[in-house]
Image (spheres, grey):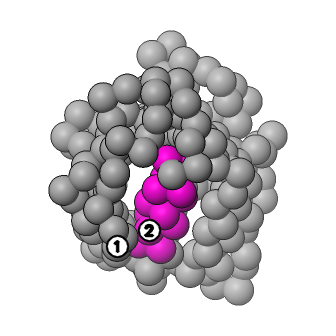
Amino acid sequence: MSAALDVAAFGAVGERTLALRHAVEEFLYHDADLLDRWRLAEWLALFTDECSYLVPSTDRPEGDPFTDLYLIQDDRFLLEQRVDSLLTKTAWAESPHSRTRRLVTNVVATHLGEGAVEVRANFLITRSRKATVDTYPGHYEMLLEADPGGEAGFRIRMRKAVLALEELRPHGRVSIIL
């Protein structure tokens, strides 16, 4: 994907260096590209073993996943099941799968120390299926871990996709990975 990750360029704890932001942007673009090309097995490999993929409900976007209802609250096992389902014809809502395009902007990356990075970025995802185009605006809150030897440079420990929608209408569902 890109050149080797230079963790030393992340700066001191709490810093937001240009080198760090650039590395995170490259990672997020790679992440979006894998999802748009429906390379879900490769996308899943970007996650750590102890990961979470969260999508809070639209009426409580800042809700606590331990006390509030979430649209999606996957650990590694459930995320693997989600990907496996989407890659087979058992996920009727995505068979054949949708065409998606993701825009990722306004990336803010903060070095937390020891290769951990807190990320916030806006997204806009369009989903086209059966002559219908749905739009999903929102932002990501992510916790990444540096993986200097890995092809992608980072691994995802936590991915929270917060939708900027008051409700899921007219969509009615989230059948794609945000």
Is residue 24 shown in magenta?
yes
132 or 116, which is in the foreground? Answer: 116
Q: Any mark on residue 24, and which?
A: none
Residue 70's place in the image compared with 108, above or below, is above
84 or 26, which is in the foreground? Answer: 26
Amino acid type at mark 1: Met
Is residue 85 shown in magenta?
no
Q: Are dots 1 and 2 in contact, CB under 8 Å?
A: yes
Quarter in which the N terminus is drawn: bottom left
Q: Any mark on residue 1, and which?
A: 1
Task: Specify the quadrant of the image occupied by residue 162.
Answer: top right
22 or 58, which is in the foreground? Answer: 22
Q: From the image, state whether disc 1 or disc 2 is nearer to you.
A: 1
* Residue 130 image offset from top left, x and y in percent: 64, 84
Q: Is residue 7 left or right of residue 137?
A: left
Label 2 Cα neighbours within 10 Å, binned few <14 / some 14-19 / many ≥20 = some
Label 1 Cα neighbours within 10 Å, binned few <14 / some 14-19 / many ≥20 = few
Q: Which span of residues is magenta-colored? A: 20-35
Specify the farthest residue to the top.
67
Picture residue at 73% right of the left edge, 30% below the top = 59
